[in-house]
Amino acid sequence: MSVFSSTRRLALRLGAAAAFAAALAACGESAPQFKGSDISGTKLGQGMELVDYNGKTRKLSDFSGKVVVAFFGFTQCPDVCPTSLAELAEAMKKLGADADRVQVLLITVDPERDTPDILKQYVTAFDPRFLGLTGTPDQVKKAAASFKAYYAKAPTKDGGYSMDHTAAFYLLDGKGESRVLANNNIGVDALVHDIQALLKG
């Protein structure tokens, strides 16, 4: 199963929430116009409880006041993850001083291989402010379920494995509410636009 098809299915499942948000806007509520899919009201991510690469337990409430950009991936990902993290790093540069009010989280879907040290070396190579989160397989499973994110092992010919996973950015506002689901190919400018919209909210 490709990461792209799983992301499309997730977007479809969250379509009802986007329609609800549009209805609110039609009733006079002021709602920002996002480049990604508006998922306000879905409460995604509320069950996240993982450990960062410093060994500190993390929940969304730890990032109160900041826009959170969460992304599921793994350090041995050959293409989607490094490309996405490079785009997030570029977005942080474009945000300038506002980037200090943004927290990027890479949540590993491969806790067996992504040790805290490996995660730290990997994510901070893109931006020293990025955090990598891991946990027990059960903790990772619960975190992914709370975001409705898909992941699964994919055996390789050499007897090892890779990981299939949802490739999307989840944007949460300063109150920890899920607001935007953005496909990983949305582009830097669109990401910056949506992050700025949440920073103003």
Image: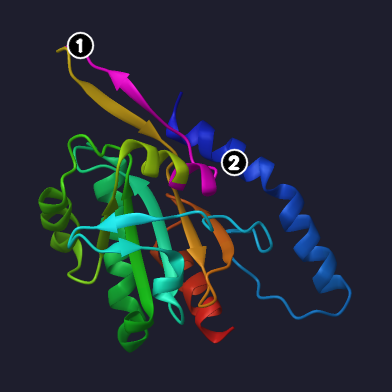
Binning the other alpha carbons within 10 Å of mark 2 as few (below 14), some (14 to 19) or many (20 upward) gives some
Binning the other alpha carbons within 10 Å of mark 1 as few (below 14), some (14 to 19) or many (20 upward) gives few
**Quadrant in the picture for residue 115:** top left
Say which element carries label 2: helix
Q: Is residue 50 magenta?
A: no
Point 67% across, 41% down: residue: 12
Residue 199 spot, x, y in % from top left: 50, 82
**Quadrant in the picture for residue 53:** bottom left
Rendered position, 57 above or below 98:
above
Point 62% across, 59% down: residue: 43
Which dot marks residue 157?
Answer: 1
Point 66% across, 64% down: residue: 40
Left or right of 106, for residue 173 = right
Q: Which residues are drawn in magenta? A: 143-157
Instruction: Please state which amino acid type lies under the numbered disc 2.
Output: Leu
Q: Is residue 156 magenta?
A: yes
Left or right of 42, for residue 131 = left
Point 33% across, 36% down: residue: 137
Q: Are marks 2 and 1 in contact (CB under 8 Å)?
A: no
Q: Residue lying at the far right in this picture: please name it.
A: 27
First in sequence: mark 2 vs mark 1: 2
Instruction: Please state which amino acid type lies under the numbered disc 1.
Output: Lys
Residue 151 spot, x, y in % from top left: 41, 33
Say which element carries label 1: loop
Residue 185 spot, x, y in % from top left: 43, 50
**What kind of colouring is applied to the model shown?**
rainbow
